[in-house]
Structure formats: structure tokens, C-alpha cells
Image: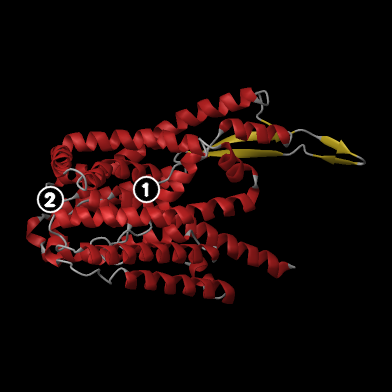
Amino acid sequence: MGKFLQIFTVPDLRKKVFMVLIWLVLFRALAAIPIPGVNPEQVRNFFAGNEIFGLFNLFSGGALSNLSVIMLGVGPYITATIIMQLLTMIFPRLKEIYYEEGAAGRAKFNRYSRWLTIPLAFFQSYAFLRILASQNVVGSLSKGELVINVLAITAGSAILMWIGELISEYKIGNGISLLIFAGIVSSLPSFISQIVTNPGQIDFATYIAFGLLSLLIIAGVVFVSQGERKIPISYSKRIRGNRMYGGSVSYLPLKVNQAGVIPIIFAISILIFPQFIAQLVAIFSVSASNKVAGIMGVFYNNQILYSIAYFLLVVVFTYFYTAITFDPKEISKNLQRSGGFIPGIRPGDPSGEFLSKLTKRITLFGAIFLGLIAVLPNITQIVTGTQLLTLGGTSLLIVVAVALETMKQIDSQLVLREYEGLE
């Protein structure tokens, strides 16, 4: 509480917090502006019975269920960032920009991601509107109305990406993560009202069990999010002139969950991809589109098969994304250049092999944890026998992770100002 109150005693930090809140309020205002031709009742029914689109709605902060102009949320930008990181494995020049050119290279890499966001938002908005139209969620749109809606949604995604970048510049949290965080938190009042207005459907013991399970999951999320294996790093002593450098001891932190929530986004994208393909195929062959949609409908309705596939995809993508973002060979090379080494391990390739084996073992726990978090809503539905108390593990993971990261950045700024006051 002392740290929280201290925020408002520092004028510069207080101004940053208020500006971030203003941008988040603007985000929620945009989420309430619907596109033309919306059937509210059909929208509610569609998202209540479709878990995958419900997760997309989560990442859009509820904007998708409102069919607002920012209905895609930050999804296109996240997808563009993931694609760019995947391309670093194919194009050496991109890998060089991302890993070796420092801050300037990262800025250039982020600029490419922003450019890629626009065409992705265009095609995703078109596919979404076609899917929603096929489910009678939106009315029949003429070609002119379809183009106008697609352009409006694409512009909304660009505006949201811009807002996220502005929030990040205040250095009190990642802007994209805070937008998702705000969307999740904004859905809490409606969740509570559903429980209050339907008291007879759930007994008191179920409420108690749900509360205890929620606390347990939050504790687990904090434990795994903060968990890390510290690898000791020693630096050899070097003498230059009359001065001696090095000889210090540090550590390399290997997080249990290095991938964050990205593997869940990957898995959702793969699961929903056939529906996008079906809508694009419909342009050329309606019968082929219906066959693809029918096969996927059988898969989505089989809760056990769907949960198993979802869990396995999350586990696979956790390993995959960790391998992209954490390169043991590159880390070992950087250590060797700076005169650092892992005690008991030879520098160079042996250090890279050691880090690779250790990362795979640590990632196993993170992958299983993320997989369980992803299928947690299905588990809670089976245990409680109701859809009212659906514990969203993904929501808890995002909320806790973003809150911890924001607290760290605010705390670092407070500590910095304390040191400045001593000068």
C-alpha cells in the first residue's frame, strides 16, 4: 500500500499513470462502438456457445462480442510479431537485425511488425465478417458495406496498435499487455452480475470450492511466472594497463515459463484457422467450404477431443516459441566474447549444449502448466456442471503476469527517483 500511495507523491510518475488510464478509457470507449448491421441477441448466443471465439473475445477485451470497430483487438499485431519472430529462423538478415543490432535493430524489427499488422488486420476482418454472416450474427452485407466494415475494422486495429505503443512509452507496463488486461478486468462486472442474478442454479458449497480453486490457481500462476533457474556465470580477470577488470560473479536466469501466453495464442490460431480457410474457399467452391466447416463442427463439439488437441498444441508451441526466443548457442557465444563462463562447463559449444538441455527440462514444466491453464475452463465445467462458474485460467495468467510486470516497472522508477534524491 505504501508503494501505491508513493506513486501519487511523484509528479512525473503520477502524470504517467493518469495518461495511461486516459488511453485505457479511450480503448474501452472504442470497444463500445459497433459496426453496422449487428444483431445483439445473435451475437450473445454465438459467443456463449463458441469457446474459441470466446478466447478471441478475451484478447480483444470484449470488443469482438460487441462487434465494435476494434473487434480484432491487438490480435493482428500479436500475430504479426509472432510471424516476424518465426521469419528470423528463415532469413539470417532478420535474425541479425533482431539479435545483433541492439536497440536500433529492435526498433526496425518492430516497424516491420507494424507494417505487417495492416494486411493481417484486413484479411482477418474479412474472414471474421464472413464467418459471422454465415452464422446469422450479422445481416447480409452488400459488397460496398463489406468493404466499408473491413476498412473500419482495419483502421480500428491500427489505432489500437498505436495506443499500445504510446502506453509502452510511459514505461509503466507493456502497452499491448495492458490493453488485454483492461479488457479482461472490464468483463468482471458482467461475470459477477450473472452469478448474482442466478443464485438458485449453484449451491453454496460450489461457490466455496470455486473461490478456493481460484486462489490456488492464482498462487500457481504467480509461482510459475516468477519461477526461474539461476545459472551462475563467472567472468575471468583481465589486466589492462594498471587496472584489473572482470573477476565478478553473476547469474543467467532461465524462467520456467519463458513463452508467456504466446503458445496459447498460437494454439487458438491453429484451431480457428480451418474456419478462416473454409470462408476463403467459399469464394471458389461452396460445397468444399461446407465440407471443411462440417468436419470442424464435429471436432469442436467433441469436448474431450478438442481439449486433448488444445493441450498438445499448447505444449508443442511452448517448446517451439522458447526455441525461437532463447538461442543457447547465441547466449554461449556472447558469454565467451565477454569473458564469461559457467563454472564446471567449458566455454563455447559445451556451454550451449548445457543450456539447451537445461532449457528443455525446465520448459517441460512450463509447457504442462500452460496446457492445463488452457483447458482449465473445460475442467471447471465438468467439475461444477455449470457454465456460470467457468474459471478462465488464461485470463488469470494474463492478469497476474501483467500486474507483476507493471509493479516491477513502477517499482524500478520509484527506486530510480530515490537514488536521484540522494545526489
In the image, residue 267 above or below residue 119 = above
Q: Nearer the viewer, residue 42 or 189?
A: 42
> Looking at the rendered structure, which numbered label has been put on residue 386?
2
**Which residue reaches farthest left?**
200
In the image, residue 68 above or below residue 337 = below
State the SS at label 2.
loop
For the C terminus, the image quarter is bottom right
Q: Measured from the top left, where is residue 156 in percent x and y?
A: 36, 66
In the image, residue 60 above or below residue 369 = below
Q: Quadrant of residue 190?
A: bottom left
Name the kind of residue labelled 1 in the image.
Ala
**Image position of 256 (left or right of 36):** right
**Which residue reaches farthest right?**
242
Q: Which residue is mark 1?
A: 219
State the SS at label 1.
helix
Q: Measured from the top left, where is residue 326 in percent x and y?
A: 53, 37
Q: Residue at x 25, y 69 (%)?
A: 34
Q: Nearer the viewer, mark 1 or mark 2?
A: 2
CB within 8 Å, label 1 to label 2: no
**Image position of 266 (left or right of 83):** left
Q: Residue 388: in sight, yes or no?
A: no
Q: Residue at x 15, y 37 (%)?
A: 295
Give the distance between the C-alpha atoms of the residues marked 1 and 2, in whole angstroms: 24 Å
